Image: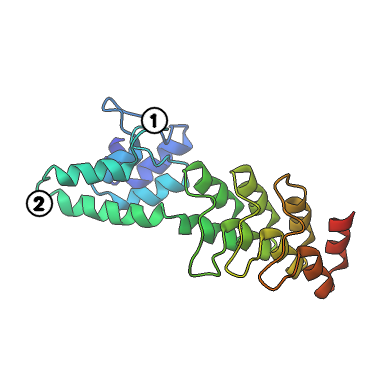
Amino acid sequence: HRACAGGHLECARILLSAGASVNATNKANHTPLMVASLVGQTNCLDFLLENGAYFFANGTDGPTVLDVLAERQEDKMTSLTAPSVQGAIDWLKTATSPLRLYKAAASGNESAVRLCISQGLEVNWINESDHRWSPLIVACSENYSGCAQALIEGGADVAVRSDTGQTALSEACRAGHVECVKLISAHPDCERDAVDNDGFSALMLACANEHPVCVKALVG
């Protein structure tokens, strides 16, 4: 807590490597992430989140760090403290956006996907600027089956549709990504016969794009 309060990143790094808990609470029941946020030590925030810090102010539940910071601003903080806390608020809004999870899935970074899910980022968030795809759809479109597995374990909806009616299964079939096809088609909520806006099912897309391995995975 003291290392993060002072912005001493290397000290925090050493403490974590020695076994310190990234989500330990102090006498005020605040985690290191909360402490760093309150004093505006934005250089520590990314490090803490990357190492598993929960986004809750006091550990694993209750108000989030942003909730508490917003309350502090409403309580008329001093002009000396307010700018640094506003910096922390702005940084955390970006770092804890569901877009962070989407980008992790799109790049195939499974460890980042799992970390984002553990920190409470919305697993079924829809990217309005990218075909209205979910993290699961983009992972399957890029053949990142490990990310897709992590998303499903985290509660991803396999039936979510894009703006053209595509699902994670249909995208995997269109691109010929058989491991993703097997993963999604085995899910109990998978709608194998669903059709997109053009009337094509996943099986039809696999056939149209000449992906026999995907066809076999679907028909057994």
CA separation, marks 1 and 2? 30 Å
Q: Between residues 26 and 94, which one lies in front from this camera angle?
A: 94
Q: Between residues 62 and 202, which one lies in front from this camera angle?
A: 202
Q: Tell me where residue 5 appears, x and y as whole percent.
A: 26, 41
Which residue does the numbered mark 1 point to in the structure image? 24
Which residue is depicted at the point 15% across and 48% down?
A: 81
Q: Can residue 6 be spotted in the picture?
A: no
Local SS, label 1: loop
Model colouring: rainbow
Where, quadrant-wise, is the N terminus in this rendering? Answer: top left
Q: Tell me where residue 179 appears, x and y as whole percent.
A: 77, 56
Q: Answer above or below: position of 131 versus 122.
A: below
Q: Please name the amino acid that badge 2 sits on.
A: Ser
Q: Can residue 141 be spotted in the picture?
A: yes
Which residue does the numbered mark 2 point to in the structure image? 79
Mark sitting on residue 131: none
Which residue is depicted at the point 65% across and 54% down?
A: 159
Dividing the picture into quadrants, the one containing residue 104 is bottom right
Q: Please name the amino acid that badge 1 sits on.
A: Ala
Which residue is depicted at the point 25% across and 44% down?
A: 69
Position of residue 213 in the picture relative to residue 123 (left or right): right
Crowding at dot 1, Cα within 10 Å, few <14 / some 14-19 / many 20+, comes out as some
Crowding at dot 2, Cα within 10 Å, few <14 / some 14-19 / many 20+, comes out as few
Q: Answer above or below: position of 159 versus 208.
A: above
Position of residue 76 in the picture relative to residue 152 (left or right): left
Count all numbered tags in the image, as a single digit.
2
Local SS, label 2: loop
Where, quadrant-wise, is the C terminus in this rendering? Answer: bottom right
Q: Tell me where residue 46 appears, x and y as whole percent.
A: 40, 51
Q: Tell me where residue 172 appears, x and y as whole percent.
A: 72, 63
Q: Between residues 140 and 21, which one lies in front from this camera angle?
A: 140
